């Protein structure tokens, strides 16, 4: 062992894995890039092979709803980038969230979540998850102790966005992970806004990472996708909170997932039950588009954060701008946390307040010519939106303010265009927005 | 405890060259992990001989089970142990007695004392690994389940056995 130890190779770097992980040449054709396996199903060698596959005794493909070679290449790649053990992809970020919670929670169970989340997640947790019998307790994440205070004996997990959409808020993950560990429950981190290039939640004690791959991983605004990565380090057998992992599964003739699949037991369960029975598999074509996107993730993210920093600094000095909430700015209360958790840059999605409130905010968004007015983030293109009237409009006024999406708030997702052009467009839109709002008020 | 490290080439060579695996703790129940591993390794061309006192004389997956390693009449290349770490000692003694060149302890199983004893006789010891998972990992099959195999290669074939 000592001999071998001295020959332990350096693990390949992030950019190498972004290109190569999960994507070695196709063994049957030699195709260098991952082919799009546009097939619903796969032939069995014989009846015994089929039985082994259905019993999960051997590795292999049965039906694309539960597995497909293009999709598994993507899963392995993202698992590698997160330094995780295994991953399961989904048709969207929301589908990944649903399947993750479905794998861990029973009806009547509860969980604690940061209140600074993508608006769609707040709605999913508050209303749709209620129909599954799950109750969420939202907390202000800026004090980690709030998570502990909200825990009840029925709580089975803690959920947060480390870099929150839309607010430029960075959560102090490390103590929250400690609180989860003390309670014997996993910390689940939505790492969409940072991407594994900027932050790797498993380094800070998280147990599961979720992405909307629709955003920076895909990166080009072409394809919906979601993914759940497990670290492989959570001990599901430490208590009796996770019967779906530790007791025989009647839907699999008494198979016990944690015992049989160990450190990828959670992913196996999520695939074999949640993906099989709920069915939100990602399309192979979308998996292919996202695979291609990820190859340039390190290059794109570096430019995204460079541009975002420059735009945020410009906006902070603009006379029509009341405030800028970007954790990369020295003025941000989250600047120290950003230095700790996001040393390469504080992401490229942030908000700012327009002087003149709701009207001026809306008019600014309507006046852009290069930025695109739409409801997405993490595109090569720069994007802009007024959350209060769009993505977050399901929320109550109190929730809006709590989620960082008050009436004057404009959210931008800074792309990788020439930064001077982004700045020039925002400058003219802010001035035009102010003009229109003032003349409307005068009439 | 020191982190265990076995280079891929070493595991690959073991899985390429071995033919007969004695599986200590092989279960008769189809939904037990050892049964999964046995069935998979058989499919990959290994002969797997079950060792299980409760099943001695009976067949598991077409192979006669023996009460102990020392009862096996054939040459054994790998002894694969599905037993708690604190119960591994006497099994390793038996494995040394029958001259098995490779002693392999399953995932989560580790006994450094027994390993040192076996290594002193010239045996190779692998701990806290599963031969099924390692075979799947190095052949790429494990990646079909979205598992991070950590294998990065520009070569077309990851085939382990001829
Ligand atoms: C942080 C975050 N999580 C989850 C989601 C949901 O992902 P999807 O739209 O892919 O379902 C989004 C989408 O905006 C998001 O921004």
Image (cartoon, coloured by chain):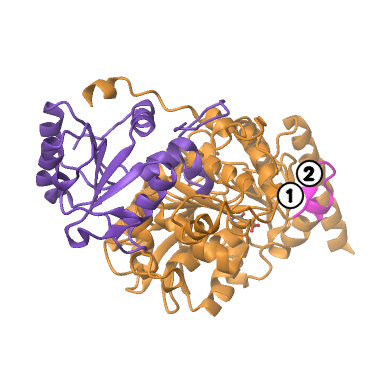
Chain colours: A orange, B purple
In-image side of B31 versus B98 (left or right): right
The segment highlighted magenta reads A363-374
Front-lying residue, B67 or A348: B67
Asked if one can make out residue A378 in the rendered structure from this viewpoint, the answer is no
In-image side of A16 versus B17 (left or right): right
**Residue identified by numbered label 2:** A371
Q: Residue at x 34, y 42 (%)?
A: B131
Residue A364: in magenta span? yes
In-image side of B16 versus A362 (left or right): left
**Residue identified by numbered label 1:** A384
Q: Secondary structure at mark 2?
A: loop
Query: Where ligand 1 lies, by image quadrant?
Result: bottom right
Q: Residue at x 55, y 43 (%)?
A: A195
On the image, the x and y values in percent for residue A60 come to 53, 50
Confirm or deny contact between disc 2 and disc 1 (CB under 8 A).
Answer: yes
Asked if one can make out residue A381 in the rendered structure from this viewpoint, the answer is yes
In terms of image quadrants, where is residue A260? bottom left
């Amino acid at each position: 062992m000592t001999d071998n130890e001295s020959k332990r190779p350096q693990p390949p770097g992030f950019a190498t894995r972004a290109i190569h992980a999960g994507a070695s040449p196709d063994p049957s054709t030699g195709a260098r890039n991952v082919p799009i396996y546009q097939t619903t199903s796969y032939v069995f060698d014989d009846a015994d092979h089929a039985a082994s596959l259905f019993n999960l005794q051997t590795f292999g493909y049965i039906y694309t709803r539960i597995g497909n070679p293009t999709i598994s290449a993507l899963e392995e790649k993202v698992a590698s980038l997160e330094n995780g053990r295994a991953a399961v992809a989904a048709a969207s970020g929301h589908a990944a969230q649903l399947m993750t919670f479905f794998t861990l929670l029973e009806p009547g169970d509860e969980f604690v979540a940061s209140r600074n989340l993508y608006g769609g997640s707040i709605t999913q947790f508050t209303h749709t998850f209620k129909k599954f019998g799950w109750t969420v307790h939202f907390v202000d994440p800026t004090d980690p102790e709030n998570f502990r205070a909200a825990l009840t004996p029925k709580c089975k997990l803690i959920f947060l966005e480390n870099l929150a959409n839309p607010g430029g808020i960075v959560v102090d993950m490390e103590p929250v992970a400690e609180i989860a560990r003390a309670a014997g429950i996993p910390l689940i981190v939505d790492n969409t806004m940072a991407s594994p290039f900027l932050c790797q939640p498993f380094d800070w004690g998280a147990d599961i990472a979720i992405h909307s791959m629709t955003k920076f991983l895909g990166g080009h605004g072409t394809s919906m996708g979601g993914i759940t990565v497990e670290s492989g380090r959570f001990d599901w057998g430490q208590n009796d909170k996770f019967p779906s992992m530790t007791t025989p599964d009647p839907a699999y003739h008494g198979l016990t997932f944690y015992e049989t699949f160990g450190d990828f037991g959670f992913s196996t369960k999520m695939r074999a039950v949640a993906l099989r029975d709920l069915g939100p598999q990602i399309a192979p074509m979308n998996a292919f588009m996202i695979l291609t996107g990820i190859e340039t993730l390190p290059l794109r993210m570096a430019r995204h954060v460079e541009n975002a920093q420059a735009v945020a600094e410009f906006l902070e000095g603009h006379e029509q701008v009341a405030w800028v909430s970007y954790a990369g700015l020295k003025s941000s209360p989250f600047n120290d946390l950003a230095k700790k958790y996001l040393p390469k840059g504080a992401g490229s999605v942030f908000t700012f307040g327009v002087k003149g409130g709701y009207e001026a905010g809306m008019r600014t968004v309507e006046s852009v010519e290069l930025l695109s007015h739409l409801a997405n983030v993490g595109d090569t293109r720069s994007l802009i939106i007024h959350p209060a009237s769009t993505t977050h409009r399901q929320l109550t006024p109190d929730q809006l303010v709590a989620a960082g999406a008050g009436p004057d708030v404009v959210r931008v997702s800074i792309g990788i265009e020439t930064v001077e052009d982004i700045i020039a467009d925002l400058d003219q839109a802010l001035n035009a927005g102010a003009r229109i709002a003032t003349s409307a008020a005068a009439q | 405890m020191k982190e265990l490290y076995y280079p891929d080439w070493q595991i690959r060579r073991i899985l390429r060259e071995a033919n007969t695996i004695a599986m200590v703790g092989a279960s008769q129940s189809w939904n037990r992990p050892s049964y999964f591993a046995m069935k998979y390794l058989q499919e990959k061309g290994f002969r797997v001989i079950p060792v299980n006192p409760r099943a001695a004389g009976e067949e598991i997956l077409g192979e006669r089970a023996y009460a102990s390693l020392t009862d096996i009449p054939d040459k054994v290349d790998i002894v694969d142990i599905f037993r708690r770490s604190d119960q591994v000692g006497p099994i390793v003694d038996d494995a040394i007695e029958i001259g098995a060149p490779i002693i392999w302890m399953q995932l989560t199983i580790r006994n450094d004392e027994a390993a040192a004893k076996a290594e002193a006789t010239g045996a190779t010891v692998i701990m806290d690994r599963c031969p099924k998972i390692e075979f799947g990992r190095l052949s790429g099959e494990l990646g079909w389940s979205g598992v991070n195999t950590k294998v990065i290669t520009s070569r077309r074939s990851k085939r382990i056995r001829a």
